[in-house]
Amino acid sequence: MSTKVEKTVVVDVPLSTVYNQWTQFEDFPHFMNGVKSVTQLGDDRLEWVAELGGVRRQWEAKIVEQVPDSRVSWAATEGATNAGTVMFHDAGNGRTEVHLVLEYEPEGLVEKIGDKLNVVENQAEGDLERFKKFIEAEGYATGAWRGSVNEGAPVGTPGVEHAAASRGDDGKAGVSGKAVAAGVAAAGVAAAGVAAAAA
């Protein structure tokens, strides 16, 4: 079962500058908590390494559509099952609206517990806020890629069905004993809370 997250932030920086910074994928660890590295393997391929709540995940993603100053859409091709779109809109007065749509499939006990506790949703909101602070503090993009990928193709917003090749994960998730203990403890706290509410 998949989970869909939608978050929006308005950035006090012009559209092209915001879009240009977003295309600097290898800079994502500067403002995305838990992202250890993003490696650009080509114009339309990225390798991600992230750790959230003690769970280390690695995956490859394909950019299925990229339109300058408009959108970047992706779908995982292996590893953690996820897909989505980031859309950019001119909000007037030199401001830009950044809208994220993310769909993912949690795997394993720890991720499923984290999903119930809205860990990814809270992380996405925090990452957008950190991106806002990052680009507003800089005032300019650290680089830019103005190329297109499948511009004009009827892609829409990809969902996990577009990331079907990544299902199963093939052991790319590493879970520490500490994370399992934290997940079990969180589940115990949640269960105790439900029991207390029922009583």
Image (tube, rainbow, N blue to C red):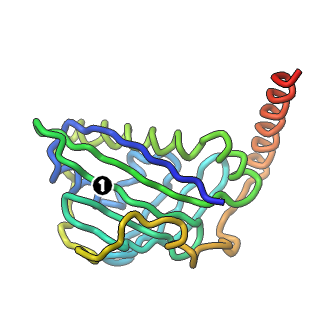
What x and y, as percent, mark residue 119? 60, 42
Q: Determine which residue is flagged by label 1.
A: 87
Apparent side of residue 137 relative to residue 124 in the rendered image (left or right): left
What x and y, as percent, mark residue 42? 34, 78
What x and y, as percent, mark residue 162? 49, 73
What x and y, as percent, mark residue 145? 21, 66
Label 1 sits on a secondary structure element that is strand
In the displayed orientation, state which residue is furthest to the left. 93
Apparent side of residue 163 relative to residue 143 in the rendered image (left or right): right
Name the image quarter holding the N terminus: bottom right
Residue at point 17% right, 49% down?
Answer: 15
Residue at point 42% right, 71% down?
Answer: 46
Nearest to the observer: residue 71 or residue 35: 71
Residue at point 50% right, 70% down?
Answer: 76
Apparent side of residue 122 relative to residue 32 in the rendered image (left or right): right
Q: Amino acid at mark 1?
A: Met
Residue at point 30% right, 47% down?
Answer: 98
Q: How many marks?
A: 1
| 10 Å crowding of disc 1: few (<14), some (14-19), many (20+) | many
The quadrant in which residue 152 appears is bottom left
Apparent side of residue 59 relative to residue 175 in the rendered image (left or right): left
Q: In this picture, is 195 found above or below 124?
A: above
The quadrant in which residue 172 appears is bottom right
Name the image quarter holding the C terminus: top right
